Amino acid sequence: MRGGKRKRHGKKADVSKVKFNITKKRGKTVVTAEKELIRTKAELEDEIKKLKEAKKEATKTKARKRRAPAPIKERKALDYDPVDAGMRKDLEAKRAAREASKAERDAARARREIARQKKDQRGKEEVSLKDVLGGDFFGPGGVAPE
């Protein structure tokens, strides 16, 4: 046989990942493996679900922090934009401007209505094609040539 020498090393159980206790019982050395906490599939899935939720929350909070505006380094003074009279006076001025432009808006609306009525009136008029296009358009005798 040419297989070579049989190698027996490396056949032992891998105990590097197993935790065990070595104790002496009545003079004999006894090795007992520590029992691992065995969880059910449902418990593992619940834990995975909780971890995923925590990760989602962490990414959301991180995004919120990134979106937050940078703090203002140099703040403006309180009298940076001084106010002459206040909000009430501003509203009164706006109202006065709106009242002043109301007459112009009404006049423009009336002009548009008159123009619309004229256009409708012109569209409803009956027109003789001979008068508009001329008598020679239709040919001699008022009949179109063939």
Image (cartoon, helix red, strand yellow):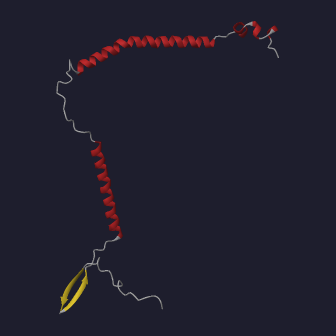
Q: Quadrant of the C terminus?
A: top right
Q: Is residue 141 left or right of residue 37?
A: right
Query: Residue 140's image quarter?
Result: top right
Q: Residue at x 33, y 58 (%)?
A: 52
Rendering coords of residue 46 (x, y %): 33, 64
Q: Residue at x 35, y 65 (%)?
A: 45
Q: Is residue 10 left or right of residue 146?
A: left
**108 to 6, vertically: above or below:** above
Q: Residue at x 71, y 9 (%)?
A: 133
**8 to 63, vertically: above or below:** below
Front one among 42 and 53 = 53
Front one among 5 and 49 = 5
Query: Residue 130's image quarter?
Result: top right
Front one among 58 and 53 = 58
Q: Is residue 145 left or right of residue 85?
A: right
Query: Residue 15's image quarter?
Result: bottom left
Rendering coords of residue 135 (x, y %): 75, 7
Rendering coords of residue 77 (x, y %): 17, 27
Report the number of numbered marks.
Answer: 0
